[in-house]
Amino acid sequence: MAKKVVVAYSGGLDTSAVIPWLKENYGYEVHAVVGDVGQGAEELKGVEKKAKNSGASSCVVVDLKREFAEDYCFPMLISGAVYEGKYLLGTSIARPILAKAQVDFALKLKADALCHGCTGKGNDQVRFESTYAALAPELEVIAPWRIWDLGGREDLLKYLADRRIPTTATARKIYSRDRNLWHISHEGAALEDPWNTVPDDIWMLTADPRKAPDTPQDVSITFRKGRPVALDGKAMAGDELVIKLNAIAGKHGVGRVDIVENRLVGMKSRGCYETPGGTVLMEALRGLEELTLDRETLHYREQQALRFAEIVYNGQWFTPLREAMWAGFEQIAGALNGEIVVRLWKGTATTVRRRSPNTLFSEAFATFSKDEVYNQKDAGGFIRLFSLPSRIAALGKKNKGKLAGGGKRRR
């Protein structure tokens, strides 16, 4: 009986070539699994037939949209994770759930190996294989891009043509794109020269902010324990809310990023990302934190967000460290209940209204008018204690100066 290998399949050029290559070079029975994380009906149309035309024995499409939004994107949102100050981690956060779905299918099928179509230059190979290692270390891992002699797009097209395997791909240099319900990424082509400005035709989810509506639009987000549960007062499941908010914010040009980032494998790469709904949710939740988290807790969350962003970017989702950090974020999120209004206008998303039953904001204490609850004289003693280390250091320097100038020591 032939061994079985399960391929993480997208329907693109790379994985279409992977399937026949595996059969020719390994003699394995090939099965494809497609994770639906909100890439859209157009991309998924006919994907099962395409996989079988490439030589797959079977192909399954697994609906992961709700799980992806609520169990992956929202915890990342609560953590405040943003990679290198700009990137909202749309591609990074999708890889663990896609790899997990692939492993689950492989174990159900009693397969012998797992295969992905990631290149040896990128981050995704690490993300997929780290998930394999955590969830199914006993399975063989095959990474064709690291071992085959197909050098690029032209080689792949010729390989498929020689075997009369149909493909819609062409030799024209195009952008490499990855889409899910959280974002869409664009890499390659004109972006490979960082001196090039971003071509206007690259963007797909967001309007040009210069041509966006002149009238601002306010949207209301209701949160429960840090998770968005309603949009403009209407309760929605996580995936539905993000998809709806993408359309609203995208119309106003919200969520565009152009970044030269540091890949895990060491090189720099340029990417353009569109995350309209995610940008609004990130702004809204930070506005809710301003009301509900005390200073020390908020600053701690901000510090830990940097590390959590690295964990997500590096594909370390299924690790004890990620689980431990999430336990802390989840505890903090217990206070994040309330409603935030964000104003969308010409590419910007700005919190304009906030309310929460757990607010720590007190007008009685914060007012600049006369109040009865705060004695301003108390601040003097606080400042003297707060600045005591500085005062001691300064006095020490002065005393050393006197001794150096011939002053007498006290006995």
Image (tube, rainbow, N blue to C red):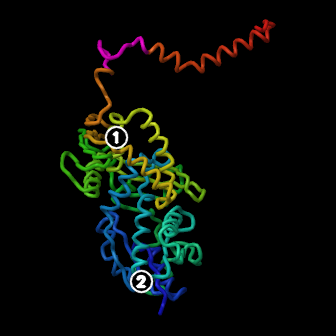
With 219 as the anchor, is 278 left or right in this view? right
Q: Position of residue 158 (x, y in %)?
A: 50, 80
With 206 as the anchor, is 131 left or right in this view? right
- What residue is drawn where x is 42% and y is 51%? 327
Asked which secondary structure carries label 1, the reply is strand
Q: Is residue 138 magenta?
A: no
* Residue 214, quarter of picture: top left
Q: How many marks?
A: 2
Q: Residue under label 2, please give it.
A: 54
Q: Is residue 95 above or below residue 226?
A: below
Q: Nearer the viewer, residue 224 or 154?
A: 224
Q: Position of residue 316 (x, y in %)?
A: 50, 59
Q: Residues within 10 Å of mark 1 (few under 14, many from 20)?
A: some
Q: Residue under label 1, please give it.
A: 348
Q: Residue furthest bottom?
A: 1
Q: Position of residue 253 (x, y in %)?
A: 32, 47
- What residue is drawn where x is 28% and y is 46%? 224
Asked which secondary structure carries label 2, the reply is loop
Q: Position of residue 232 (x, y in %)?
A: 20, 45
Q: Residues within 10 Å of mark 2 (few under 14, many from 20)?
A: many
Mark 1 and mark 2 lie on one chain; the one further toward the N terminus is 2
Q: Nearer the viewer, residue 208 or 134?
A: 134
Q: Residue furthest left?
A: 234
Segment colored magenta: 366-378
Q: Main secondary structure of the magenta part?
A: loop
Q: The C terminus is located in which quarter? A: top right
